[in-house]
Image (cartoon, rainbow, N blue to C red):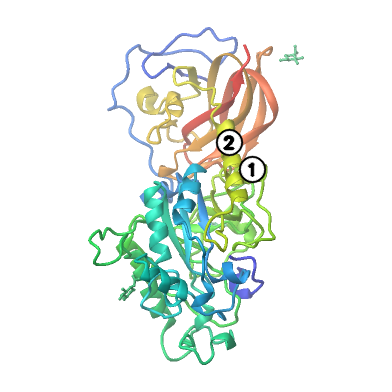
Amino acid sequence: MKKTASPLSSRLGGKSCTTIRYGRQLLFLFAAATTLFSQQTSGTPQTTSGAPPPAPHLRTPTQRQLDWHRMEYYAFVHFGPNTFTNEEWGKSQSLPDVFSPTNLDTDQWAKTFADAGMAGMILTAKHHDGMALWNTTTTIYKIGSGTWAQKRALQGLDTDVVRLAAQSARKYGIKFGVYLSPWDMHRDPAVPKPGLRGTVYDEAQIFGDSSSGGDYNDLYTRQLTELVTMNLSPNGTGFEEKVDLFEIWLDGASGSDTVQTFDWARFRDIIRANQPGAVMWGHQGVDARWVGNEDGVTTATNWHTINRTQDQAHYGGEQLQTGMRDGLYWAPAEADARMRSGWFYHANERSKTGDALMSMYLQSVGRSVNLLLDVPPDTTGRIVQTDVDALMRFKELRDAFLRRNVLKSDMKVAASSVRGGDDTLYGPANALDGRADTYWAMNDGETKGSVEIDLGGVFAVDAVIVQEHIALGQRIGGYAFDVMAANSTSYKPAVTGTSLGYKRIDRLAAAIQATRIRVRVTQANAPPLIQSIQVLGSRVG
Ligand SMILES: *[C@@H]1O[C@H](CO)[C@@H](O)[C@H](O)[C@H]1NC(C)=O
Ligand SMILES: *[C@@H]1O[C@H](CO)[C@@H](O)[C@H](O)[C@H]1NC(C)=O
Ligand SMILES: *[C@@H]1O[C@H](CO)[C@@H](O)[C@H](O)[C@H]1NC(C)=O
């Protein structure tokens, strides 16, 4: 369970037309009913030596961040002692015996997520209560010390739940990540632990800058190192390929007054050295930031950059949602949200419906923010059927919505201007080719312009999806989507927006019968680069 649950201060917290392309090869003449489809130029495909590429605009994402943006939607798995004590924030009072799933099935988790179209899963390797789900050497306060693990070991079964989940993720073709809570109640002297007193689990209270008997940052570093160097199979069993992590979640939540200064730079270096592809998630990065709420939604304006690091004062929720335009750090937002009311499984809670999840998706992924949806296993160690059903219903709704792109790569497309007149490299047809490495670009110094597409028939249009080529930075601060109705010769705006970014999905207030559409950039801080345009609807004439 994350951030907002704790009130504590430690949390805080879119001219005239000059070129036209027909498909990817031909220029064409089109006697347009409107002024814009005019014409110029030569007949043969242009060579690619022409216009120089646009310069990057301020901060740009790393490859790991680009790969991460493209994941869009993946699962959070809260599982551990709290599952069995029906708590959200257990206070490290339970002995390891408490962890007792009757039918643990990490394959069922991974298959569910893969079937649901989720790109990966992130598992709570250690939540705030401090009990480790993997076979750590840093503490005996781990599930491996309990009777569930001992019985499994006697059967020759692996008892490391983090590794089991990683293997299942691999088996079903989804990515894997871990959550390792920085705040650790098990080590925090401000959290009384009568339940552990007099047992071997009553370990040194080293959490906090003024604690004695050890350095918590050292302990955390060792735990992190174990996780980022974990093998897919137990040591000595032959197949010792390293678990590949896509994200490491360093929760900013704390429920105690104990002041602990975390060594974020050291944590980052260990992650970089061992898992160069892994995004480090924190309240303010370093690679991805919290979206400022736990509802799976963000505001209409959302920038991928911010101005602060993990070491600086925490932004409030509103600033985290919007981000900072042209900020100092590429730290895009991820929206963490729940399938049910809590993060851990509670029998009395209901699953969100497919419709509710679709709405959440449009307000997160539809606003350039990744959606991390928590789906907690129950006390059997499986995901309950109502959650599975809701995830599948959401997938049906999403697929049915998204697969209606009416734009085809051979449609007549025209742009207000094309960079260096080089249609092959920078023409508007690049926005229809489904590729992430091509885009429509205009000339340096131009920050407003438009692309028009002749649909070649009448389509009932109800949504538009536009992507900036963020590999070269986020540029656009104003855009519009215009529609020419079937019986009209002029455009009417159907959508206006502010920031664009990785991907925007805008639904129209009502479906419009259209023969042409236009995407306009009305404001940008550098020449806009449009990587993709999709228009959703269906043919009616
Ligand atoms: C856990 O780790 C210890 C120490 O590295 C090792 O001796 C033991 O075999 C491991 N247990 C399991 C179940 O992998
Ligand atoms: C972020 O930092 C940049 C560079 O220092 C600065 O120009 C901008 O005003 C800052 N933005 C905010 C919202 O503080
Ligand atoms: C345009 O066509 C729509 C149906 O597609 C109709 O509802 C509307 O009245 C028509 N408008 C005009 C000005 O003819």
Nearer to the camera, 203 or 442: 203
Q: Residue at x 48, y 51 (%)?
A: 108
Q: Residue at x 57, y 24 (%)?
A: 518
Q: Which residue is mark 2?
A: 396
Q: Residue at x 52, y 68 (%)?
A: 80
Q: What kind of residue is marked 1?
A: Gly
For mark 2, give the secondary structure: helix
The answer to whether residue 123 is left or right of residue 295 is left
Residue 311 image point, x, y percent: 48, 70
Give neighbour class at mark 1: few <14, some 14-19, many 20+ (Cα, 10 Å): many
Residue 82 image point, x, y percent: 58, 70
The answer to whether residue 372 is left or right of residue 482 is left
The answer to whether residue 271 is left or right of residue 403 is left
Q: Classify 204 as above or below 394.
A: below
Of all residues, the one furthest to the front in this rendering is 155
Q: Earlier in the sequence, mark 1 or mark 2?
A: 1
- Asked if marks 1 and 2 touch (Cβ < 8 Å), the reply is yes
Q: Which residue is mark 1?
A: 354
Q: What kind of residue is marked 2?
A: Glu
Nearer to the camera, 244 or 504: 244
